[in-house]
Amino acid sequence: MEERHAPAPDDILIRRQQDLETTLAAFADGELRQATARISDPAMHHASTA
């Protein structure tokens, strides 16, 4: 019979931190793309100065 050990608390923490970093990176990338699209859109420049 194979004995399974629970992951060490450090392993759990490391995995959660990696997941958080991945999630934050994806969010930041999406926000950056949206901001870049807004800045690049000439209509947005005209709307903000009107």
Image (spheres, rainbow, N blue to C red):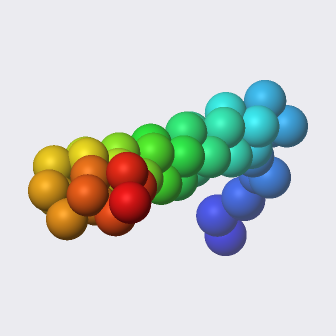
Q: Of residues 6 and 38, which is closer to you in this image? A: 38
Residue 9, horizontal then vertical, whole percent? 85, 37
Q: In the rendered view, does 20 fall on the left or right side of 28?
A: right
Position of the N terminus, as image quadrant, is: bottom right
**Residue at the spot x=55%, y=39% of the render?**
21
Residue 43, horizontal then vertical, whole percent? 19, 65
In the displayed image of the protein, which residue is found farthest to the right?
9
**Residue at the spot x=45%, y=45% of the render?**
28
Q: Is residue 15 visible?
A: no
**Residue at the spot x=16%, y=49% of the render?**
40
Q: In the rendered view, does 47 fall on the left or right side of 27?
A: left
**Residue at the spot x=66%, y=38% of the render?**
17
Give the vertical position of 47 relative to 13 (above or below). below
Rendering quarter of residue 8? top right
In the displayed image of the protein, which residue is found farthest to the front?
50
Position of the C terminus, as image quadrant, is: bottom left
Q: In the rendered view, does 31 fall on the left or right side of 36?
A: right
Q: Of residues 5 and 30, which is closer to you in this image? A: 30
Rendering quarter of residue 12? top right
Give the vertical position of 17 relative to 27 (above or below). above
Q: Is residue 13 visible?
A: yes
